[in-house]
Structure formats: structure tokens, C-alpha cells
Image (cartoon, rainbow, N blue to C red):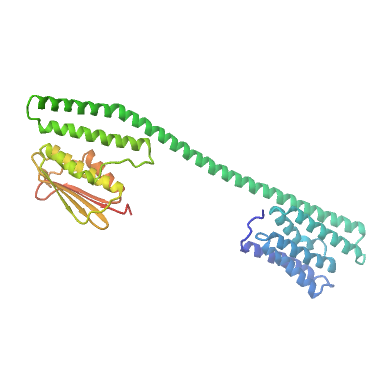
Amino acid sequence: MGFEQGRLPNATDVVLAATVAAVLLAGALATPVMRPLDHAAVLVGSLALVAWRWSPLLALAVSTVCMLFYAGSATPGPPAAFPVLISVFASVRAGHRVLAAAAAVVFLGGTLAAQLAAPAAKSPQEIIQGTTLLLGWFIAAGVTATVTKHRQAYLRQAEARAAEAERTREEVARRRAGEERLRIARELHDSLTHSISIIKVQAGVAVHLARKRGEEVPAALLAIQEASGDAIRELRATLEVLRDSDGEPPGSGLDRLDDLVDRARSTGLPATVTITGEQQSLPTDVDRAAYRIVQEALTNVGRHAGQASALVRIDYRPDELVVQVDDDGHAHPDRPPVPGVGLLGMRERVTALGGRLRAEPRPEGGFTIRAELPVKGPS
């Protein structure tokens, strides 16, 4: 219920207490009836204000007792109320209204009684008027503290509402992103899956008719049938990602490398695989990226390298996975090919994982693609 409790005094609190002490001691020195005990009461009551933020009740108790003793001994007038006023303000702002009001009543009643009992320096009417003025000051301090407390509460509520609004915006954005993923998934399903399914069915019919007639089934036709089946499987895995961003659907990884290379060979591309190092379990994103790099590299060899062969190297290292695909096609350092969408996508995959990609013609002819993928994620 108190505010800023548990904190140590800061420089502002020390300056405030020292200033009040200096002002009151300066006035006390001009009073001939002051005793050393009165000076001590002024000093302690003023320096108690260093605790007005982090322990307002402590400051209230010490300042009220000390300044009441000082006012009853020397009748210094309104200045003696300064430390008590500040402590009352702090206590009300911290939520201790009853204790603050009780301290104010005790201080005002004590000073009024002391002044009335003292040798008549002022008339009773003047004393009552001065006490009434002090009462107005205490009421003003309480009202100001209450307003300040409500303003702080309003600011905290405003901050909470702003945080809630930000959270709500994030939830709305996530919901809209989910809706967009579902829309894309439906579009892909309607446009691509059906078309690829038709290709697979037609290829299957052609294979069946060829075998029924006793004819040799063309290798390209078998490759089309197998590739369309794999394409449907991978497309459905992609659709699952779009439908559920939190899930990790099974995708293509290096465990399907042999199938990928066999499919490339069935299209007439001589391809060999070399695996070095101690094979280890790879992060899912690294495993998929490695598969896609080999897939795209073999596709590019089949499209652009003519009658070429390909060598796939997979090197397992303690802190990274090296994937390299070399071909002996027509590429030459003097005639570098223009990077296409496949190479750009490959570079984006590698960069996202914090790895490095080199794709360039080989000095002895042909093209090389080398990707170095950290197995512990991007740095």
C-alpha cells in the first residue's frame, strides 16, 4: 500500500532533509530560550525526512515527536510544522490516511496547548488563528497527496491498458496470419495437389498399359510417376505447416538422400554419393536445408549441365555439416551462369541458418555448390 517502500534514500531526499534542517536550525539559533536538546530535536526531526519515500510512517513518527517536543519547548511558530507536513503528505500518498490524520491532530493539539500555556506573547485569538492556518496547510497536504496517489494509480492503469492493447494487437495479428495460412493452404491444395495427382494417375496408367502390352517401360515415365508421388507428399507436408505453424510435420531430410539420388539417376544423370565423418542427429531445419540443397543442385545439373555427372559429398563435422555437389558440365569461370530462383532460395536457406554458401564454376570446368551449415543454429 505504501509507495516505493524498500528503497534507500536518494540524493533528492538527503537534500530535502538537509535544507529543512538548515532552515529550522537557522530560526532556532535566533531564539534565546533554545537548549541543546531542542537543537537535537530539530535536527533529528528534519533529518527523518530522508525516509519519507521508502518508509513514510517512520518519518511521520520521528518528525511528529521531535517537532512536537521542539514546539512545546520553544514555541517557534509555523516553521516547526514543516517536517510534519511533508511526512503527512508522504503517509497519505502511501495510503496511511488515518495515521497521518492522527499525527496531524496530535501535533496541532500539542502545539495549541503549548502556546496557550506559555507566557502570553500572543493573544489566544492569534494563537487559534495560527493553528487554524496550520490546519489548512495539513488539509492541503492531505488533499494534494490524495490527488497525487490517484494520478499515479491512473498512470499505472493507463500503462496496463496500453500493454493489454499491445497484447491484443499481437493476438489479432497472429489470428490473421493463421487465417492467411489457411487460405494459402486451400489455394495450394486446390491448384497444385489436384494437378500433380492427375499427372501421377496418368503416368501410372501409361506404365500399366506399357506393361500390359509387354513393352519396356521408359525410365523417364517411371521417374515421372515416382517424382509426382514425392511431390504430393512434400506438398502435403508443406500444407500442414501452413495449417499449423506450431507443428513440425515430417519433411524431407538426408534420410531420403538415397531416394533423391536414385530418382536423379533414373532420369539419366550419373550421380554418386560420398559421406564422410561420423553421422549424427541433425536439427530439423539443418536436415531439411541439406536435402533441399542437394535436390536443387541435382535439378540444376539435369537442366543446365548437359551430359554431365554429379558428385554429392556430405561431410559430418562436430560443429557443422558440409554439403557439396560438383558436376563436370559446361560451366566455366569465364562464363559464370546467371543465378536463378533456385540458387537465391538456396542462399536464403543457408543464410537463415547462419551458414555459408559458395556457388560458382569450377576451375577445371563444371559447377560446384558448397554449403557449410552450423549444427547448433545461427550464431
Q: Residue furthest left?
A: 215
Residue drawn 30% across the image and 47% down it: 284
262 relative position to 156: left or right: left
User: Relative to residue 248, is residue 218 depicted above or below?
Assistant: above
Image coordinates of residue 214 in percent, x first then y, are 7, 26
Q: Quadrant of residue 15?
A: bottom right
User: Relative to residue 43, is residue 352 depicted above or below?
Assistant: above
User: Relative to residue 9, is residue 1 depicted above or below?
Assistant: above
Q: Quadrant of the C terminus?
A: bottom left
118 relative position to 180: left or right: right
User: Exactly how many numbered labels are in the figure?
Assistant: 0
Image coordinates of residue 74 in percent, x first then y, are 84, 68
Question: Along the line of sight, which residue is nearer the eye, 282 or 48?
Answer: 282
Image coordinates of residue 235 in percent, x first then y, are 28, 34
Image coordinates of residue 33 in percent, x first then y, are 85, 72
Question: Along the line of sight, which residue is nearer the eye, 263 or 77?
Answer: 263
Q: Residue furthest bottom?
A: 36
Question: Along the line of sight, which residue is nearer the eye, 376 or 134?
Answer: 376
Residue drawn 75% across the image and 58% down it: 85
Residue drawn 81% across the image and 60% down it: 78
Q: Quadrant of residue 248?
A: top left
Question: Along the line of sight, which residue is nearer the eye, 336 or 308?
Answer: 308
251 relative position to 128: left or right: left
